[in-house]
Image (cartoon, rainbow, N blue to C red):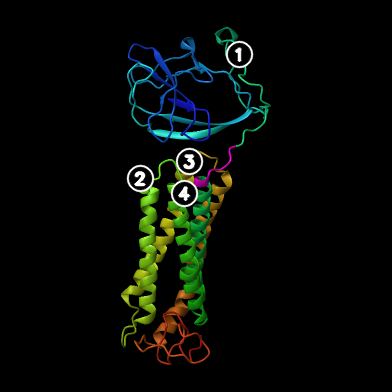
């Protein structure tokens, strides 16, 4: 088990403790210059002291192990900490190598807040407690601030642009297609502008910021070292395929058929999959990637917004199925043709259709609902 006194793993002093076969507990003070094996600090600024009388080790598969140490207070009332634990027991020496942790996280200790009456407090026998350590420096009880690095600022920009692209603009384009396609051809202009002209630059800029964030980090070679980064590349490929499929559907139409082509169903299905994967990708970004970048706090507002939009978006989209009967009636009136679109002077060249051509979901000429 390890506790680190800082916002992230690199350059953060740590206290690592583990049980030994003889029932004792080892304590090692370490620091890492990267996301790698921390090395022993021979003369730490604050010396941690193992409290053997208060420490217990788990035996016979039980889960009652407890590792206790004391360390002088740094005088900061609100501090950020990291923690990690593993399951593989290293050797008993303080400089022993150990395997990568199985899980990790962060926490904030705020000593400026008072305990409320509803909080349970477990009292410990005073005789069992060691003397209270003194602060090693006379700093005020203020919050320690950690300015963002260049890598962290770029990670923020990456998150902002990609979230707007995948969870705002792409869903907006899908909603426009679902709700407005039976009212006129203008829906297509809004659809492709949102899905391609607006979402495309946002996604590409976001990915560029993500790559720059890694390049400016302490481990610039780790571009594809986890699922979030690998899924990011997969999502980009799927998005580009979706755009090309949409263009193909618009410009290449089957001859003399009243059935909707297979590629139209494929386009709709891929669109929903793309948005669903966007939700997953955004969540892994703020739940795991930001921790890897800085161990910074993710406020509850991020979770609230994510869950709220996760619920509302399907309601809005599938609610648009009420327009499906009208759409199907319109499509039965005008068969799909492969005639080339021609401009009638009232619509853009992308949307203009000849009198016997029906863009899927458009109102056929002369149709009345």
* Alpha-carbon span between mark 2 and mark 3: 15 Å
Q: Nearer the viewer, residue 285 or 182?
A: 285
Which secondary structure, mark 3? helix
Answer whether labels 2 and 3 touch (C-beta < 8 Å).
no
Q: Residue at x 31, y 87 (%)?
A: 255
- Residue 217 lies in what quarter of the image? top left
Q: Is residue 140 above or below residue 157?
A: above
Mark 4 or 3, closer to the camera: 4
Q: Earlier in the sequence, mark 4 or mark 3?
A: 4
Q: Earlier in the sequence, mark 1 or mark 2?
A: 1
Residue identifier under label 4: 213
Residue identifier under label 2: 225
Answer whether labels 4 and 3 touch (C-beta < 8 Å).
no
Find residue 130 and report its horizontal and vertical position in percent.
56, 10
Look at the magenta stretch and give its main secondary structure.
loop
- Residue 219 lies in what quarter of the image? top left
Which secondary structure, mark 1? loop
Residue identifier under label 1: 132
Which numbered marker is on residue 367?
Answer: none
| Residue interval drawn in magenta | 146-151
Q: Earlier in the sequence, mark 2 or mark 3?
A: 2
Q: Is residue 318 above or below residue 225?
A: below
> In the image, 73: left or right of 103?
right
Residue identifier under label 3: 291
């Amino acid at each position: 088990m390890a506790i680190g006194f800082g916002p992230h793993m690199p350059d953060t002093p740590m206290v690592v403790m583990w049980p030994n076969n003889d029932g004792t507990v080892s304590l090692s003070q370490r620091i890492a210059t990267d996301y790698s094996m921390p090395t022993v600090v021979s003369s730490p600024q604050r010396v941690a002291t193992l409290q053997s009388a208060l420490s217990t080790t788990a035996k016979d598969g039980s889960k009652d192990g407890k590792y206790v140490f004391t360390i002088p207070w740094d005088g900061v009332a609100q501090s950020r900490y990291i923690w990690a634990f593993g399951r593989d027991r290293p050797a008993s020496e303080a400089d022993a190598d150990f395997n990568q942790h199985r899980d990790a996280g962060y926490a904030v200790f705020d000593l400026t807040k008072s305990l409320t009456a509803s909080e349970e407090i477990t009292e410990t026998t005073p005789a069992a407690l060691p003397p209270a350590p003194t602060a090693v420096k006379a700093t005020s009880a203020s919050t320690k601030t950690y300015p963002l690095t260049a890598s962290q600022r770029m990670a923020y920009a990456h998150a902002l642009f990609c979230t707007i692209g995948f969870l705002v603009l792409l869903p907006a384009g899908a909603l426009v297609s679902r709700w407005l396609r039976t009212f006129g051809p203008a829906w297509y202009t809004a659809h492709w502008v949102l899905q391609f002209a607006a979402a495309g630059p946002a996604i590409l800029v976001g990915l560029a910021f993500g790559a720059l964030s890694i390049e400016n980090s302490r481990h610039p070679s780790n571009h594809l070292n986890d699922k979030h980064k690998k899924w990011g590349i997969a999502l980009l490929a799927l998005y580009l395929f979706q755009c090309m499929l949409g263009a193909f559907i618009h410009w290449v139409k089957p001859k003399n058929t009243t059935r909707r082509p297979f590629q139209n169903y494929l386009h709709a299905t891929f669109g929903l999959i793309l948005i669903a994967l966007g939700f997953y990708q955004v969540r892994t970004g703020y739940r795991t990637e930001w921790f890897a970048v800085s161990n910074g706090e993710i406020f509850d507002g991020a979770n609230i917004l994510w869950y709220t939009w996760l619920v509302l978006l399907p309601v809005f989209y599938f609610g648009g199925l009420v327009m499906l009967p009208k759409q199907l009636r319109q499509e039965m009136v005008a068969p799909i043709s492969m005639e080339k679109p021609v401009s009638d002077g009232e619509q853009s060249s992308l949307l203009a259709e000849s009198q016997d051509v029906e863009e899927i979901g458009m109102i056929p000429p002369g149709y009345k609902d």
